[in-house]
Amino acid sequence: MQLTGKLLIGAQELPATAGTMKAFNPASNSEIEPEFAFGGTAEVDRAVQLADEAFDSYNATSLAQRAAFLEKIADGLDAVAPELAKRASLETGLPVAQLEWETGKAATQFRQFAAVVRQGRFRQAAIDTAQPERQPRARMDHRLQKIALGPIAIFGASNFPISYSVAGGDTASALAAGCPVILKAHNAHPGASEIQGRVIQQAVREAGLHEGVFSLLRGGGNDIGEALVDHPLIKGVTFTGSEAGGMALYLRAQLRPDPIPVFTEMTSTNPTFVLPAALAARGAEIGDGFAERMLVTVGQACLKPAILLAVDGPGYAELKNAMIARVDAMHARTMLTPGIHTSYKKNLARLANSGAHQVAAGSVAQGEWDGQSFLFEVDGAQMLDSTVLSDEVFGPAALLVRVADLEQMTAIAKKFRGQLSATMQIDSADYPAATRLLPLLERRTGRIVINAFAHPQEVSHASIHGGPFPATSDSRFTSVGMSAIERFLRPVCYQGFPDEMLPEALQHENPLGIWRLVDGELAKASA
């Protein structure tokens, strides 16, 4: 596929109106051709106007038509997988094999959402039939389904250039819901973004849909993003990135004349709690496993386990030594962007200045943007006294917390802010203590893992990638898994409608053949 660097607005390819940029290869410390166009507020307005024009017809597509469209995107991703992975590797420094896997994951997500659409359960159809004889007042027939919000602005992420980017789960779930998408590509991987954008653009064309179903924008600075959030025709926003960036968009959206939902995924340290019996039985195994998962993708995963808490007792020395051995043996590897590398160095200094003691270090960086791996240690009292030791360090570093006893571990757990995940390593003798700790974790995280680690995560109906603030801006929703579609839906009740005017999902004979809640009972029968 020939990269042109142009903006993809509907079916059009448009040149720069606000400057250009080149991709950057962090491994070679050099720019990559071609030049990529930046747009301005006029391009934002054009893309959003097209999306609004497309909304009614796209939202009205049949379940079969929309599912087939999503499958076309998946097929297109499969077709470009080698090319996409190679380009993304140049722009991120990540291994080609990992990016081929990521492309496969993205394609799978589109197929999974196609299945969700075909089943129709996302409509959450509910029917309460008329009860004219009810006293003291008759009940009218009323029926509910969920419909799409409208055009959605999606901000591509930096750390996963495919599965959290243009062809990521946000795009897949928004399109599955019936929402046109305006994608602001991340400037860390413009070429990979264009390839994905062209795949979706081609699928729109082949499916015979309105061109405004998808557009790809690019911009320098904050103008494009702010214009998207401010646009009155945008009805929702997704963002994956820093707490500062996410909150800036969230607060801006609440100041609109008509506030809109902003679904942000921001920061998490995904703490691991190692309870005494498990520590004594398999401390070395747990320590090695934790460090191995912490170092995946150079520590640049949102589910990276970053803090491990264990009681200073039998097994602690073995756990610590295993972590040290894994970190000491790790070669420095290229980080995603110079900006991420610079932030990592600042956060390492913050840890050291906060009293954390360095106990292990990987090989010294050779390339300018290589990230050296580190392990730090503090005791429980330091953790309780500090306001910053529990903050995220995005990169290949972790913090080991040596706690005095289970009471101190519990006290520290209460201090954690919202998390995407938390892990407990336990054996059967730890069940009473784990049961006491569980409610604290339930209040602070969206996913609790037993005897494994938070990364990797399955993409499934039961997946949750969310949690209380500041992990996300709305703990009721997930950005991963089939439930992610719920972010882009809202309920509408139809009361007293003649059958021929009802949406298909709510008609008496159930022409879609979907499961519906009829007078409080799940059924596929007529209602």
Image (cartoon, helix red, strand yellow):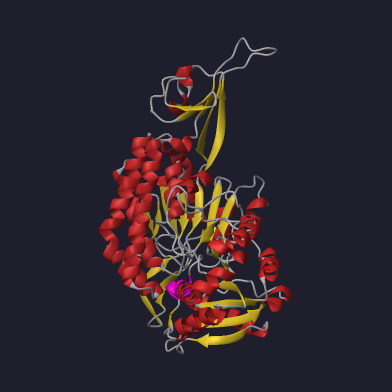
In the image, what residue occupies the spot 52% across and 35% down? 146
Main secondary structure along the magenta-highlighted residues: helix
Residue placed farthest to the right in the image? 385
Residue 62 horizontal/vertical position (percent): 37, 34
Q: Quadrant of residue 77?
A: bottom left
- Residue nearer the viewer, 282 or 394: 282
Which quadrant would the N terminus be assigned to in this image? bottom left
Residue 370 horizontal/vertical position (percent): 45, 83
Residue placed farthest to the front in the image? 429
**Is residue 46 in view from this perspective?**
yes
In the image, what residue occupies the spot 50% across and 45% down? 151
In the image, what residue occupies the spot 47% across and 82% down? 327
Compared with 117, 245 (above or below) is below
In the image, what residue occupies the spot 64% across and 83% down? 356
Residue 298 horizontal/vertical position (percent): 45, 76
Q: Quadrant of residue 140?
A: top right
Asked if residue 295 is among those painted magenta in the image, a careful observer would answer: yes
Asked if residue 424 is among those painted magenta in the image, a careful observer would answer: no
- Left or right of residue 449: residue 432: right
Compared with 344, 186 (above or below) is above
Extent of the magenta region: 292-300
- Residue nearer the viewer, 140 or 170: 140
- Left or right of residue 34: residue 251: right
**Is residue 56 in view from this perspective?**
no
- Residue nearer the viewer, 66 or 516: 516
Residue 33 horizontal/vertical position (percent): 34, 73
Tally of numbered tags = 0
